Image (spheres, grey):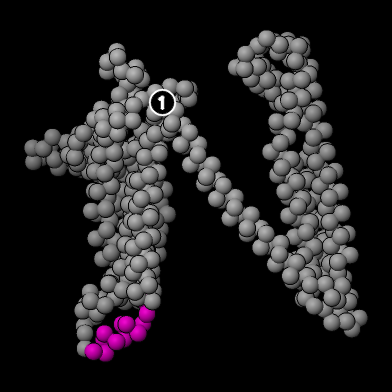
Amino acid sequence: MTTAAFLCLLVLSIFGYVWNRQAAAGIRNGGARLHSLMRFHGSYSLLMILVPTLVLILLWLVLQGTVIDAILKSDISDRLEGLGTGEVQLIVAEIKSIAIGNIFGTPEQWKLDAAERYVAANARSGQLLLVMVVALSLVLMVFSRRKVSAEFRARHGVERIVSGLMIFCAVAAIFVTIGIVASLVFETAKFFAKVPVTEFLFGTNWEPQIPLREDQIAAEGAFGWLPVFLGTLVITAIALFLAVPVGLMSAIYLNEFAPKRVRAVAKPFLEILAGVPTVVYGFFAVLVVAPAIRSFGQSIGLDVSPNTALAAGSVMGIMLIPFISSFADDALSAVPQSLRDGALGLGATRAEMMTNILFPAAIPGIVGGVLLAVSRAIGETMIVVMAAGLIAKMTINPLDSVTTVTVQIVTLLIGDTSFDNPKTLAAFALGMMLFIVTLIINVFALRIVRKYREAYD
């Protein structure tokens, strides 16, 4: 029924558009001068039908489950009396499973009856939604049709609706961000209620699975985040050491020195490289880069771990090359042509023009791109899981196994999780630290971009 409701909404919206447009055409053909174009009269009807009805459908879908669950629990309240929250949720889940046909064993008859009523309630809800969608759409269609006249300012009406939609989207984005941060802060506070802040910030052991001493407050492991953060820094530094010079040099060559045919071929290849999934980079790191580093290291007598920060960071650097190159190329292309012509006209070579004029003028965009690449490197997970390992160590040796913040977050939240123990809550504390670090980097990048953009505009 939900699909039918969406289809009805789409059909009625299109019909409203055509109806209003034809009505406006009739007025114009009659000799009257319309205030707005015919397409604005049609768009006014379309938006008047589409927006409120779509809001109704979304609200209905959000609240439908809660209301039907409440009705279900009310129907079987005598069976649920005296049971705990977990047992109630288990029974409700079993009834829902029966309702969709997943029957295990021989359920009691009252559960079968409840499942049947649950199915009927869902069906009635779908039918009621369809009726309300059709009724509301028809009412709005007639309302919009009655608005059509030579004096009606349809364009202003459309602009008001679109403006309202944009305001709603902006407000929704802000509140979603606030909600995400608030949930992160709330869970992090629960973690610090169990583990001292000093132990987390200054501890040099990260062993959330193993208790190190009996009198430890958490009694479920060590939660010092420094080894995890150090591993993140090592891999990020290796990635940037490879990606920044190669990305910048490729951007400079393609932007200023490459023939048009070379640029036409090379730039799409770089963009294809940017679209490769990270799991493919992980396979490349495990199957090619890591064995090559290990073989080379053993040939010269170095002790190399099977999983190394060097393998993960190198492949991550390859992944970031098109990212940095694209940003740098855009920044170089945005420099006014007058600066190039002026430098060349004064007798500078192309290399002198690039190093003394073009590159300094493009620094804001280049620095912004590099710092955004840093944020992406810090947040990368898949390559690190496959190539760097899961062991947190206080080491800066690139030939050793390390781990990162994002990998540990994934590890802590895999499988059945209970959100009342330090092990699970530690993931939120790591997430909060990652959020703070990336926020500082992004703020720093924005300040640099704004500062230098004003100087060269």
What residue is drawn where x is 77% and y is 50%?
Answer: 53
- Residue 351 percent coordinates (x, y): 21, 77
Above or below, 243 relative to 63: below
- Quick one: quadrant of the N terminus? top right
Q: Name the amino acid type tagged 1.
A: Ala
Magenta residues, start to end: 335-346
Between 59 and 306, the one nearer to me in the picture: 59
Left or right, residue 204 beside residue 410: left
What residue is drawn where x is 91% and y is 81%?
Answer: 30
What residue is drawn where x is 29% and y is 76%?
Answer: 358
For the view shown, which residue lies furthest in the right direction?
30
- Which quadrant would residue 412 be assigned to in this image? top left
- Magenta portion: prevailing SS class: helix
Residue at image mark 1: 193
- Residue 215 percent coordinates (x, y): 30, 14
Left or right, residue 102 beside residue 179: right
Question: Would you call the spot at circle 1 few (<14 residues within 10 Å), some (14-19), or many (20 or more)?
Answer: few
Looking at the rendered structure, the secondary structure element under dot 1 is: helix
Above or below, 80 relative to 418: above
- Residue 278 percent coordinates (x, y): 39, 46
Between 158 and 234, the one nearer to me in the picture: 158
The number of discs equals 1
What residue is drawn where x is 72% and y is 26%?
Answer: 69
